[in-house]
Image: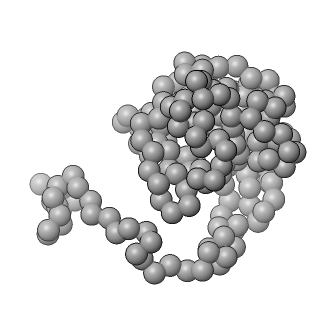
Amino acid sequence: MTWIDQPAEGIVAGAIEATAPESVATVDAKLFREGMSRFAAAVSVVTTDGPGGKAGFTATAVCSVSDAPPTLLVCLNRKSSSGPILQTNQVFCVNTLSGDCEPVADMFAGRTGAVKDARFVTGTWTTLKTGAPVLDSALAAFDCRVVEIRTIGSHNVIFGAVVDVKMSAASPALLYHNRAYKHV
């Protein structure tokens, strides 16, 4: 057994004790947001469809969690109108945007005023296994079933088991950095 396999003193193997975020001294929220604006991130549109209706939102807080089993997470502000719809549907698709998809990103970010179904007039959409909308021009689309939702501060962290993946030809990706879109 290596030291990595051995639990820390007082910690049960496989369990991690966490401190509630609200009980930890943190920096000012404005300073945090300013620092995060320097963090370059891929732009995705997260979509859902099912008994709760059709909805979607633009997100940069998306990341892989594990490849065994394939799992990713998405962070969504609890005030978002898409949250209850996604919770009801229990499925979502992360559509990673290419550099030419700024209009799609703006539509789903709410910059046009369109809401729910009306956001899907931009782009061409299909579905995979879950029925969540898949953007045909997405660099990669990760079709997911919700496995867990955790509330952390102002956001829900939604964990999804990836049940299907669709990829398009490689092209520049759309990033968000310093409060502006960039292509890489």
Q: Is residue 8 visible?
A: yes
Horizontal and vertical percent position of residue 170 = 71, 33
Q: For this view, does 161 lie left or right of residue 165?
A: left
Residue at 50% across, 44% down: 158
Horizontal and vertical percent position of residue 66 = 41, 42
**Front-most of 157 and 141?**
157
Q: Is residue 170 visible?
A: no
**Front-most of 166 and 11?**
11
Q: Establish if 5 lies above or below 48.
A: below
The quadrant of the image that shows the N terminus is bottom left
Horizontal and vertical percent position of residue 38 = 69, 68
Res 118 → quadrant? top right
Residue at 69% across, 37% down: 56
Res 176 → quadrant? bottom right
Residue at 36% across, 36% down: 68
The colour scheme of the drawn protein is: one colour
Res 39 → quadrant? bottom right
Q: Establish if 32 lies above or below 76.
A: below
Q: For this view, does 71 lie left or right of residue 176?
A: left
Q: For this view, does 16 lie left or right of residue 139?
A: left
